[in-house]
Image (cartoon, coloured by chain):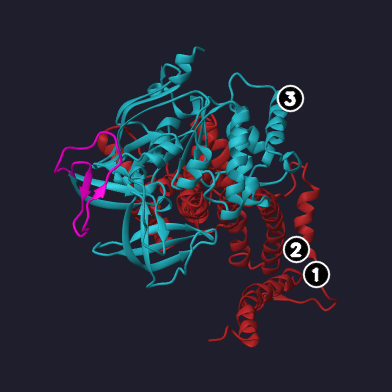
Amino acid sequence: MSGPSERQRWWVGALPWAWVLAFFVLPFALILGVSVSTPELAVPPYAMPAGGIDPASFARLGGELKTLGDEGADHQYLSAWIAALALAAFTTVVCLLVGYPFAYHIARSQPGTRETLLMLVMLPFWTAFLLRVFAWQGLLDSSEVGVINQFLLGLGLIAQPLPLLYNTGAVALGMVYSYLPFMVLPLYAHLVKLDGRLLEAARDLGATPWRAFVQVTLPLSARGIVAGSMLVFIPAVGEFVIPDLLGGGNVSTIGRRIWEDFGPNQDWPMAAAVAVVMLAVLIVPIVVLNRSGGGNRV
Amino acid sequence: MSAAADAQHLRIESVVKRYGQTLAVDRVSLTIARNEIFALLGPSGCGKSTLMRMIAGMEVPSAGRIVLDGEDLATVPAHQRPTNMMFQSYALFPHMTVQDNVGFGLRQLRPRMDGDTIRKRVDEMLELVQLGHLARRKPHELSGGQQQRVALARSLARHPKVLLLDEPLSALDKKIRSRTQLELVNLIRRADVTCIMVTHDQEEAMTMADRIGLMSPGGTLQQVGEPHEVYEHPNSRYAAEFVGETNLFEGRIEGDHLRCAGLPEPLALPGGPLPADGSLAWLSLRPERVLLMHEPPVGHDDESAAGEIADVAYLGDRSIVHVAVRGAARTVRASVPRDGSRGPLLRGTPVWLTWRAADGVVLTR
């Protein structure tokens, strides 16, 4: 039997490019076009201005930056950005701190146990994401009917129900819960490849278990840390559902801003401009993280 | 240190290692002298690696003691033992340069060793293995032989009392291996260190080691001795067959002869104390001790047997000729040096084998 022909290979190579073209490049070009158009009371609610492009939306975002020091100035997009980045950073760090020991333990356990544990990590995916976030609403509900409040009241540990839902804490909890598997899986994939003899060699050469971890395990799993952090941080920045459902109106992130501008505010050019800026901003950490991970060939 | 203490440098006392029901190492006792190169030889799964890992502190003995310079190592964790191991596949840290690999052990020392001293020691070590010019490379940029030398330098950098080598040359090509064996021995001798190596390759053990400890499946130590002792005077069929090749004849003692089923004449045994009459015993006869002739032997008292050539394995410098001896169930192997035969070495050729009774070894187990 001969290998794939030149033509067959061309088709296999073309497929991912076609995918990227159809589902990323074209939609993005569309968004880019919307971002430089003028809002209209029409369907769709925007129109290309006659003279070419209308940079008003970008100008508004730029204006927020220019008036950075002014107390009275409007910074609703900027503050939403900062809230989103802070939330995403927090989620990433906590996922890393919780996920690393998780992944380490799975990678070091017996192959049989390992499969079971991996299964358990992926088990939540069997339930729709939205349902799981709704379940958290039920758990955290701030009245007597909230599951956790009910439990604590029943034990007599608290007299009044705790305000667990619709605050930053609830959003952070929901984010960590939802994104943890995306951290654990790439970490696991790298840790399981780690040759146990390297750790033995480190111990043999006088390293305490902790120093062996810092000097050998950690650097050799750097790529897993980078991959996991990207998988968590990038979607977390634009996350909309969790801040909306668990934060109520109290946590405004950039994802919620985009949703509001596309939805109730009917300002599509503004929403599109924010989306474009978001992509541009996220490219930076992606490139940096890719670079830093590239140095560690194993 | 006194000579007596030197001879008792490392004592392994009735060490046992059990994994659940399986016995990996079975009551091994061994004394190793300072600066000796000692080879633990045996097939895979004979417990030799486990024994070495117990010396390194990576496994804990189920029973018995390991005593180094009079100190019981039981309570000393791996990272504090004055032993260092060169791992089978070297286990070099892939994210570190050659010099960082070699300096790794020095950087773990507490109180800290200062940077200049570490650099000096690393340079010394790389000088020793002649890799100074590759100090800034990563392990994956080196050849197998170079990696092996980095691993050696790394395991010697802390000046361990005992250097442990786990199958030191098994990852190398056969051709490089024989050259590296002697190179490695020279390096170890210069490093002033006691060395215990684990190998399944009898040639490697015999080339490199001062003494060999032969282990058998089940984790028992079969025989300990210098290479020539183990080869010339094996103490069991296992030792005779594992170290080198041999012809084994099974039979019962009859005076100073061994009567074997199938052989018309009993075989004469070498002098020395023999087992009691009628007891089961084996005669081991190395192929190179068997002389192959194309005419019947005349006029001397050597042992002889007639047969015909059944198979020939040509090895270049010599041939191993399998001879079907009349009446015997198994063929007898004779090693015939190149140009050492007066006639053709062809299948079916009638030949006579002779040997001196003194060249045989009587075995009782």
According to the colouring, which chain is red? A
Do callouts 2 and 1 mark residues in contact (Cβ within 8 Å)? yes
Q: Which amino acid type is shown beneath numbered disc 1?
A: Asp
Q: Name the residue tied to disc 2.
A: A57
Which residue appears farthest toward the right when viewing the image? A51
Frontmost of labels 3 and 2 is: 3
Q: Secondary structure at mark 3?
A: helix
- Give the magenta-colored segment's residue range: B254-279
Do the residues bearing badges 3 and 2 touch, measured as CB atoms within 8 Å?
no
Q: Is residue B19 visible?
A: yes
Do the residues under discs 1 and 3 have CB atoms within 8 angstroms?
A: no
Disc 2 element? helix
How many other residues sit within 10 Å of disc 3, few (<14), some (14-19) or many (≥20)? few
**Toward which corner of the image does residue A24 lie, by quadrant?**
bottom right
Parent chain of label 2: A
Q: Are callouts 1 and 3 both on one chain? A: no
Residue B314 in percent (x, y) is at 49, 65
Q: Which chain is cyan?
A: B
Which residue reaches farthest front?
B299
Tag 3 and tag 2 share a subunit: no
Q: Position of residue B321 (x, y in %)?
A: 41, 63
Magenta stretch: dominant SS? loop
Q: How many marks?
A: 3
Q: Which residue is mark 3?
A: B116
- Which chain is disc 1 placed on? A
Image coordinates of residue A126 in percent, x first then y, are: 38, 63
Q: Which residue is mark 1?
A: A54
